[in-house]
Amino acid sequence: MSVRVEERDDVACVIAEGMFTGGTETIQLQATLADLIDDPRRRKVLLNLTGTRLMLSVAIGALVAANARAREREILFYVCGVRPALKKVFDTFQIGAHVLTSFDSCDEAFEALRRA
């Protein structure tokens, strides 16, 4: 499991890899997103889930909370690389496209943020 941030132009790309089951890995993801979203200089955050194999309800709740906080702060928060199995979990919790702005391609998401 790892959570790291890469800066690309004015976009903070959070790369989450592994399984997020509600333990320290989920706390790390939640803290990383909160730090970026609460940074007054930050306007764009991209969460790359290409390497995420599993995400349980606690971790999904952390994403929904991060998205809500980003909207409050008028920060663009996009998700990319959601694997089909994880997409099914998102659909089960009804947090698909109507809650999170999600792209299949991370390059496409990055370009959309860069242009915004």
Image (cartoon, helix red, strand yellow):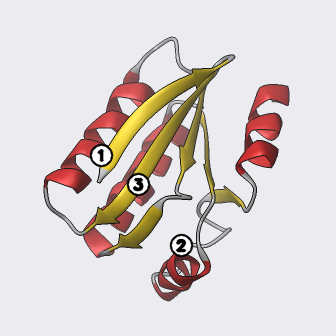
Instruction: Say which label, 3 or 1, has the lower sequence index.
Output: 3
Instruction: Say which label, 2 or 1, has the lower sequence index.
Output: 1
> Going by the picture, which residue comes out furthest to the left?
23
> Is label 1 in a helix, a strand or a loop?
helix
Q: Nearer the viewer, mark 2 or mark 3?
A: 3
Q: Which labelled disc corresponds to residue 30?
A: 1
Q: Amino acid at mark 3?
A: Glu
Quadrant of res 88: bottom right
Is there CB contact under 8 Å for labels 2 and 1?
Answer: no
Quadrant of res 69: top left
Horizontal arrangement in the rendering, residue 8 relative to residue 91 (left or right): right
Q: Disc 2 marks which residue?
A: 95
> Is label 2 in a helix, a strand or a loop?
loop
Horizontal arrangement in the rendering, residue 86 relative to residue 9 (left or right): left
Q: CA distance from mark 2 to mark 3?
A: 20 Å
- On the image, the x and y values in percent for residue 72 come to 50, 37
User: In terms of depth relative to the viewer, which is nearer, 100 or 15?
Assistant: 15
Q: Residue at x 48, y 38 (%)?
A: 14
> Going by the picture, which residue comes out furthest to the top?
41
Horizontal arrangement in the rendering, residue 30 relative to residue 88 (left or right): left
Q: Nearer the viewer, mark 3 or mark 1?
A: 3
Q: Amino acid at mark 2?
A: Ile
Q: Residue at x 53, y 72 (%)?
A: 95
- On the image, the x and y values in percent for residue 47 come to 53, 46
**The C terminus lies in quadrant:** top right
**The N terminus lies in quadrant:** bottom left
Q: Which labelled disc corresponds to residue 17?
A: 3
Q: Residue at x 68, y 68 (%)?
A: 97
Instruction: Say which label, 2 or 3, has the lower sequence index.
Output: 3
Q: Which labelled disc corresponds to residue 116?
A: none
